[in-house]
Amino acid sequence: MSVHTEVKRVSVPQLRALKGQRKIVSLTAHNFTTARIIDEYVDFVLIGDSTAMVAYGHPNTLSFTLEQTAQHTAAVVRGTRHACVIADMPFGSYQESTAQAFRSAATLVAHGADAVKLEGGAVMAGTVEYLVARGIPVLAHVGLMPQYVNAMGGFLAQGRTPESAARITADALALEQAGAFAVVVEGVAEALGADLTRALSIPTIGIGASPVCDGQILVIEDMLGLTERAPKFAKRYANLEEVMRSAVERYADEVRAGKFPEPQHCFAVKKP
Ligand code: KIV
């Protein structure tokens, strides 16, 4: 991609204004090539901390660092010119204080992020307000919050009892009040996803929530069939593992049989 190619991204206000107009489409990406391919089809790309799992093989998202997020964000920014780019605030980079959250978010913005996402309910409302007042748009994240995996005792669906649903609703309303421009709703009872979408004036982005949500997001490796196990809510739109295995098997066979490279893959000596 040339640096002179025109960049005209979907802006955060445009994303927010899509509520009630049409569904918002989003996927995760963490590298230049994937970002380049998906750019024209999505409204925003999220550099999720799920990168720790799908790109680095960690069992959860807790080990992802700010420096890693910044580098992956810069790669995704270089691969896109249409989609809004949103970077996940990694665990430990924003919970300590509003000042710490601002420094971390500013690092991601300096690497090209248009907005940041952070997990947490009402407890993070002050942080959201602080960032938004200082020019950093925030996408909130409620319901199943992977950074709470140890507290939850696993990646467990939330909002399945009236008490849990009421708590998540209060969280989402507090985050809206604090100035979040949209909220990811992950792994909740379908009725709650629909209720939140009706109750909030900002868009809900569902992942294992409800088709009623204002938009949807999936981890791209899950939907392309590149992960060994995908969550129940992740529909597989392709089986790229099968495609890769068969291509690599053919390549290995041809190399071993001396059939690759062929003449068209080789350089001739230059004529004097
Ligand atoms: O890290 C991530 O990929 C996410 C999405 C699943 C929303 O937070």
Image: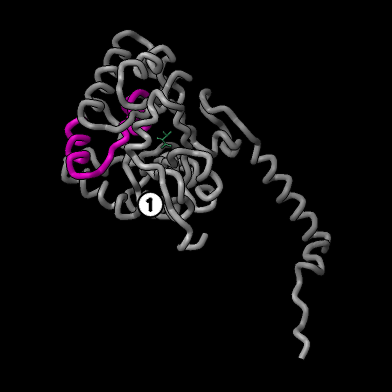
Name the residue at the bottom extreme: 272
- Image quarter for ligand 1 equals top left
Nearer to us in this view, 220 or 212: 212
Q: Is residue 105 above or below residue 126?
A: below
Q: How many marks?
A: 1
Q: Find disc 1 in the rendering and name its residue.
A: 68
Question: In x, y percent, where is residue 129?
Answer: 18, 35
Residue 216 lies left or right of residue 203; in this view the side is right
Image height of 96 relative to 204, above or below:
below
Which residue range is magenta in the image? 125-151
Q: Kindly identify the amino acid type of the residue bearing the numbered disc 1.
A: Gln
Determine the image quadrant of residue 200. Answer: top left
125 relative to 270, above or below: above
Give coordinates of residue 18: x percent, y percent: 39, 30
Quadrant into which the C terminus falls: bottom right
**Residue farthest toward the top in the current orientation of the protein:** 162
